Amino acid sequence: MEITPIAKIENGFVSKFGIPRQSGLCTALSRVVFEPEFRDPSAIRGIEGFSHLWLIWQFSEAVRSGFSPTVRPPRLGGNRRVGVFASRSPFRPNSLGLTCVKLVAVESSPRDGKFLVVSGADLMNGTPIFDIKPYLPYADSLPDALSGFAEGPEDYALEVIIPPEQLEAVAPDDRAAITELLRCDPRPSYQHDPERIYYFEYKNYRIGFRVDGKLLETVSITKIR
């Protein structure tokens, strides 16, 4: 069976490093832009009635040949193996991802036709999307479900300090998103060197930071484009 991308995502996550580990952890906005053959407005008729959507997409930057039955989840320090189907690792037999996003608006432009504005995506810019389905609270929300070895976001949330002179370099509309990304601890889970400076890019910013315990402080925020 062959599947064809119906859309792609456009956002400020220009590299894998720094993307939220799960959906919903950062309210940064993304656009879901349909491929030309799927831009018929009838295909999304009624979608405004749903607050959240499921995106089915491809880990396009993690496609591998062959099959490994086990993976090393970062949340287990990268040194313990679990079954690939007991994880959310990007290294999967079919490289498929599943993400729940909040539908913010349906908009249109002469270039792209109608597109979706969503928040909470954990997809890299340009990621192909294979399908979109409404999120149904009565069927999809299971508050008593167990999370296995996966920690909740409160277990690794950091206190973020951004010096005022660095914050001035950031557009007001981007400040909340950058703070949220930093609070979620972008580092690989097995790296805890308090002296190391890490860097990641979001939109046209290059952000450098270090972490000591639960305190994250930025060392630089510079515009790169």
Image: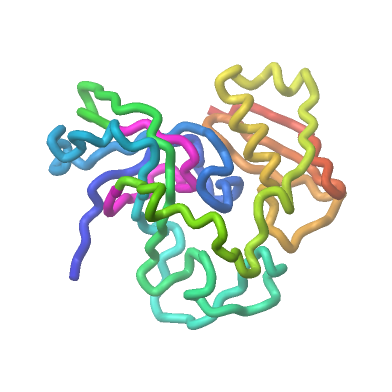
Quarter containing the N terminus: bottom left
Does 189 sit above or below residue 20?
A: below
Q: Residue 200: x and y, percent?
A: 63, 42
Q: Residue 185: x and y, percent?
A: 70, 47
Does 74 sit above or below residue 196?
A: below
Q: Residue at x 45, y 47 (%)?
A: 123
Q: Quadrant of residue 116?
A: top left
Q: Residue at x 58, y 43 (%)?
A: 25
Does 4 sit above or below residue 166?
A: below
Does 40 sit above or below residue 163?
A: below
| Count of number-bearing discs | 0
Q: Is residue 126 magenta?
A: yes
Q: Residue 212: x and y, percent?
A: 86, 47
Q: Residue at x 46, y 46 (%)?
A: 124
How was the colour assigned to the protein in this rendering?
Answer: rainbow
Q: Quadrant of residue 35?
A: top left
Instruction: Indicate left or right for 6 with 129 as reference.
Output: left
Instruction: Indicate left or right for 206 with 165 as reference.
Output: left
Q: Quadrant of residue 36?
A: top left
Given residues 99 and 200, the one toward you in this image is 99
Instruction: Indicate left or right for 90 with 81 as reference.
Output: left
Q: Residue 154: x and y, percent?
A: 71, 48
Magenta region: 116-133
Q: Residue at x 29, y 24 (%)?
A: 107
